[in-house]
Amino acid sequence: MVIGDNLQTAKAIALECGILKSGADATEPNLIEGKRFRELSEEERREVADKISVIGRSSPNDKLLLVQALRSNNHIVAVTGDGTNDAPTQ
């Protein structure tokens, strides 16, 4: 789940939806802030991409960086969204 809300809100939503199983799951890199993710090198993003369940406080570019990292790891990626901030990943 990649969401613009703060980490606490993202964590609460992820727990309610079952994306995170418990508060213990809510640690890096499983739960990461967009700023932290974008500060990683390309190689570091590729390494953690498979471990991420939730990115909070994300920017449109964070979504794109995640998609690129997952694709470079040979994943098939689908993106949904209802705003213009989702356009870069399309």
Image: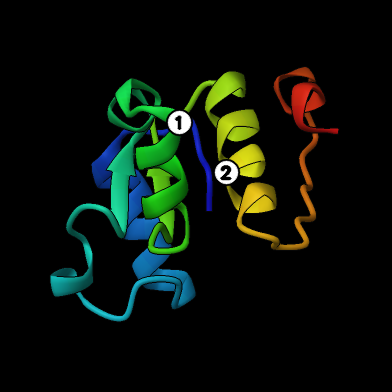
Label whose residue precedes the other's in the sequence (2 or 1): 1
Residue that protrudes farthest toward the right in the picture: 90
**In x, y percent, where is residue 42?**
45, 31
Instruction: Please report the residue visible at 32 percent of the width from the left and 29 percent of the height from the top.
Output: 40
Q: Residue furthest front?
A: 43
Q: Left of 31 or right of it: where is 61?
A: right
Q: Disc 2 vs disc 1: Cβ atoms closer than 8 Å?
A: yes
Local crowd size for mark 2, using a 10 Å CA cut-off: few (<14), some (14–19), many (≥20): many
- Secondary structure at numbered mark 2: helix
Task: Give the number of the disc on residue 29.
Answer: none
> In the displayed structure, does residue 36 sit left or right of residue 37?
left
Name the amino acid, label 2. Ala
Label 1: how many Cα within 10 Å (few below 14, some 14–19, many 20+): some
**Residue 49 vs residue 54, the one in the foreground:** 49
* Residue shown at 47% from the left, 62% from the top: 50
Q: Quadrant of the C terminus?
A: top right
Q: CA distance from mark 2 to mark 1?
A: 8 Å
Judging by the rendered image, the residue that carries numbered circle 1 is 42
Q: Which residue is mark 2?
A: 69
Q: Is residue 66 above or below residue 41?
A: below
Q: How many marks?
A: 2
Q: Is residue 6 left or right of residue 4?
A: left
Place of residue 84 in the rendered image (x, y in percent of width and height, measured from the top left): 79, 18
Measured as percent of width and height from the top left, residue 51 is found at: 38, 63
- Residue depicted at 41% across the width and 33% down the height: 5
Residue 64 figure quarter:
top right
Residue type marked 1: Glu
